[in-house]
Structures are given as structure tokens and as C-alpha cells.
Amino acid sequence: MVASAAFRRTVTIPIVINALVIGLETYPSVAQGIGGLLNAIDRAILFAFTAEASLPWDRTGGSDWIHSLAVARGARLSSPAAEPRGKMEIPIAGEIGMLRFPAILAALCVSLGQDDAAREAVRGYAHPWAGFRAGTRLIFNEITQAASFDQSLGRTTFKDKITQHVWVVKSASADRVTIHMEAGSLESDIPIYLDIPAKFRGKGEARGEEVVVVGRRSYRCSVTAISLDLDKDAGQVTRIYRCPDAPLWAVKVVAETFIKGNRNTWEEELLVEENIRLTIDGREVTCQLVKVTTGSEDGRRTVKKEWRSEVIPGGVARRETRYYAGDREIQGSAVIMEVVGFEAKR
């Protein structure tokens, strides 16, 4: 059926409509006025896409329209485990048959999104690039450690290597910003999508209250677990700890992924110090220090300390990243990012 001429003609119409809807959504004034209607149309077409994905596949080209629809949507479907947010590569017919089941799951994930409990749990969250307009500028130094062998000492030594990066927002819309990045002789334009992170999608469930200690303060937080179990082989659970008195939307966030019921990876974001003042290009910026620890069951860990501030484009004034194998820090792996200048346009 999916290979018939009548079917192809029928599905061309929603592809064209969906492309128009996606285009209209990029205009804030239009999205604000009829955003609800556009979203309803978008979801209806997405359900049609999901239904077609469950039909028998003709590997000679019967499902080329899937590829067309994905392109029209800007390939906006993402794997629930993907972080940070990016694009899903949709292969052409002939290869896509191998991805039929994952594609259905991904489509359902986007369709279902969040329930009321999950939406309430992430209320107050904002992407660190949201709200910054074209012309916003960020300048930061990246300090890495370059290894060299010192013959006089007979061992490897490490020296700091400083690379300056300049990021400028070229364009901004309700769902993404495009940033022109320069570092030395290298430059590139990178889109950053402002969708809610995949780890916050799923079914929310209240888990009572828990006290989280930050420095000398104790926050009594409401805890919500957001679960997304697409099948028995893969899933994720994110626990969010919120307190209205805290300077950030969440005091603590713990996200875990599971493979066949066994924990595979985990990430913890924890507020560890409040109201730290940094001076950047002559301006005093108040930051909240957050420790982000990412790990896997094989003992590898990445530990980041981030000085976060809403006034900084991208949300981070300074970041220190260190890598560990078990309890041992990997020599020469430390990376420091330090903002030295910025111009925020909102």
C-alpha cells in the first residue's frame, strides 16, 4: 500500500502542511498568536507519521515520504538518551527499514512528551541560551594541558595551552539559536536547539520531600521522579529536587539510564555554593556554583564545576572539567573554560 501512487499523493499534503507549520513557528509573533493551533496540527501530522511507520515497508522506496517528512520537520525527532539536544539523522528508504521500531519509539516519545507532574517538576527551567537575540557575543578562554617530554627530567610534563573562543549569535528563534563560533583559524556555524532536555520527558511521580544541604544552608525539597521506559531493554529515570527558596530552579537533579534493568550511566547536578561574585571584564557577576558529575558503571567519571549565571550567554561564567578512572584523576586531562567578555542582547 505504501508504494502505491495514491498513497504517495495523499501523504504529500501533510508533508507540505507540516513544512509550513514549522516555518510559521519560527516567527515569535505568529507562534504567540496561534501557537496552540500550530502545535495541534504539528502533533496530528506526527501521529500520522507514527501510524505510517508501523505499516509494512517497501525497501524499494515505498517509504521515501518518511524521509521527506523528517526533512520537512528539520529532523526534530531525538533519541531519549541523546544529550545534549541535536538532530536525528533519518536515512533514505532502503536503510530506514532497519530503524522502523526505534523510529516509532522516538516518535511516540515526542508525541507523549510530559504529563502534568513532569511539567510541574521542570517549571522554571530555561535553556541557558534562551532569550538571547542576534548580536549576543561571548568571549572565553579554554585552557588545556599540552604534554611534552622533558629529557632533563626524564618524564612527561604538562604546560597550559590557552585558546580564545569567540561566539556570536547569528540568529535566534523560539526553538533554536544559531551561533557563529571562532577559535584561532577555525570557524563554524552551529545550531543549538532550545527544546527541553530529553531527560525531563516522561511520566512524573511525586516522591515526597528530602533535605539537601548546600554549604551552611539546608533546603527542604519536593522530589519528583520522571520515568521514561520505552521498552524492557532501555529506560531512564530523572529525579528533580526543588525548593522555592533556592537561587536555582532545582537544587539537585539526578538522571540515570538503564539497560535491561541495570544502571548504565548516571549524572548528578548539585548546587554546592551560593552567590559567588566573579569579575568579568570589569563587571561583577553573581554566580551559583554547581557540581556536575557524570559516571558509568565501569568506574569512569567526569566532574565539572560550573559557575552559573543567567546574565552570561550560555549560562556559565567558568567551568572546570576533570576526568577520572576510578578514584584516580587522569593526568593532563583537565580543561578550564573562563569567560573574559560578553555582550548580552535580549
Image (tube, rainbow, N blue to C red):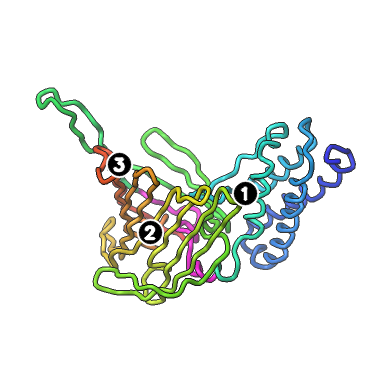
Residue 133 belongs to magenta span:
yes
Residue 339 appears left or right of 26: left
Secondary element at tag 3? strand
Question: Is residue 129 in view?
Answer: yes
Residue 260 appears left or right of 216: right
The residue labelled by disc 3 is 325
Secondary element at tag 2? strand
Q: Which amino acid type is shown beneath numbered disc 3?
A: Ala
Rounded to the nearest angstrom, the CA distance separating label 3 from label 1 is: 35 Å
Outermost residue, top direction?
Answer: 151
Q: Residue 63, image x and y in percent?
A: 77, 38
| First of labels 2, 1 by sequence position | 1
Residue 95 appears left or right of 285: right
Secondary element at tag 1? loop
The residue labelled by disc 1 is 76
The residue labelled by disc 2 is 269
Pick the residue in front: 338 or 290: 290
Outermost residue, right direction?
Answer: 6
Which secondary structure type mostly characterizes the magenta part of the structure?
A: loop
Residue 319 belongs to magenta span:
no
Q: Residue 147, image x and y in percent?
A: 24, 31
Q: Nearer the viewer, mark 3 or mark 1?
A: 3
| First of labels 2, 3 by sequence position | 2
| Residue bounds of the magenta highlight | 120-139
Quarter holding the N terminus is top right
Pick the residue in front: 85 or 284: 85
Q: Which amino acid type is shown beneath numbered disc 1?
A: Arg
Q: Nearer the viewer, mark 2 or mark 1?
A: 2
Q: Residue 62, image x and y in percent?
A: 80, 36
Kindly identify the residue that appears in the image at 38 percent across and 59 percent down: 269
